[in-house]
Image: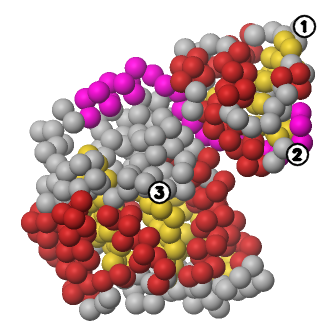
Amino acid sequence: MSEARSPLARPFPAMSAIGGVTLRVARAGYKDWAKGQERCDLTYVELAEGTVVAGVFTRNVCCSSEVDLGREAIKQGKARALVVNAGNSNAFTGYRGREAVEAIMAQVSAHLACAADQVFVNSTGVIGVPLPMDKAKAGIEAALLAAPCGWEDAANTIGTTDTFAKGATATAVVGGKTVTLTAIIKGSGMIAPDMATMLGYIFTDCAIAPAFLQQLLSAANASTFNCITVDSDTSTSDTVLAFATGAAGNAPLTGMDSPGADAFAAALHDVCRQMAQLVVRDGEGAQKFIAVSVTGAVSDDSARRVGLAIANSPLVKTAIAGEDANWGRVVMAVGKAGEPADRDKLSIGFGGTWAARDGQPLADYDETPVTAHLKGQDISIEVDLGLGTGRATVWTCDLTHGYISINADYRS
């Protein structure tokens, strides 16, 4: 984890244990961390027999072997363990990278006496360096002997350039039983939506069919993880996995007509939204959290794409960093989005104050409240296209000198 904590950080929440989930961390030594910052960099999560899994994976075509193998393993819907390596992404490493992942899966599956495809492996960090199998093996051996740890320790261990541990939790009543969802996530840079963005893990004691869990996770992903961006770069390793142990003892959810399915779906969406926003709040060098709300589009998907064009614009992001109400840059971003838009119907505002309506500046526009709004940490940009009922909200952060410094020195 980075020493300088983001000014947008949120405290780590109190999170309950999940029946059937045991967390352990260890130091594998994947990276030469700065002196005084030596830390655990391998997370091992053991899952009870009968745990089901769902997941979404990056669509970056230069993905890691972890993604390739995970995408295949998710089809069988069962999980017994998760291993997360921090400091080395093991991406663009050819057959050696795949062999390292397969070795980890074999080592853990032998320990648990389960099928290798029930062991999920994720790695994050520098691209192009094969994961050292000797360090991975020793790290897993150490983790298996380590005492169980809490959620915050695990959240810290999966981080790379993150400046704070990220966790989220929610509950739902399902068939008369209270089920809990608890999640941890890492992500700070190389964040852009194309399935998911970063590494995120959701654990619940709800009993649910794997196909239905996959349906709900994919739906939640569309309006949460796929609606955030820090720098428009989609990682080679992005993965979000949801594990359900069934320990709550509810009647298994199989579809939206199951009692409590709507409540569980809402809780899952809430946890995903919390996590997505935490990643943006830890955007590399970020000083401001920005919500871009687009209404009046021809469809929700179109609204999201317009929102992303605004949120990914370096000119918009630097204007917000400079606390400059330059709404002309928002006009530019709408126009380049490649989505239906009409210049003469476009309206733009900041913090609830409209600067332009129906394609032209308001005659009585007063920039004073907008300037005051932009001096805060939580910024909102409102865009109404005036074409239809489509709407979406996208979350991003400003672009500062800090982002350049972090990434210019990333391998130093």
Q: Disc 1 and disc 3: Cα gap in Å?
A: 46 Å
Secondary element at tag 3: loop
Q: In the drawing, does residue 411 fall left or right of residue 251? A: left
Residue bearing the label numbered 1 = 363
Which range of residues does the magenta coloring cover? 386-410
Q: Amino acid at mark 2?
A: Thr
Residue 190 counted in the magenta span: no
> So how many labels did they put on this image?
3
**Structural crowding at the residue carrying mark 2, measured as other residues with C-alpha within 10 Å and reported as few (<14), some (14–19) or many (≥20):** some
Q: Residue at x 25, y 67 (%)?
A: 98
Mark 2 and mark 1 in contact (Cβ < 8 Å)?
Answer: no
Residue 104, position as x, y percentages in the image = 22, 73
Residue that badge 3 annotates: 58
Q: Is residue 388 in the magenta section?
A: yes
Where does residue 9 sit, x and y in percent of width and height?
A: 47, 39
Q: Dot 2 corresponds to which residue?
A: 389
Q: Is 121 located above or below residue 339 in the figure? A: below
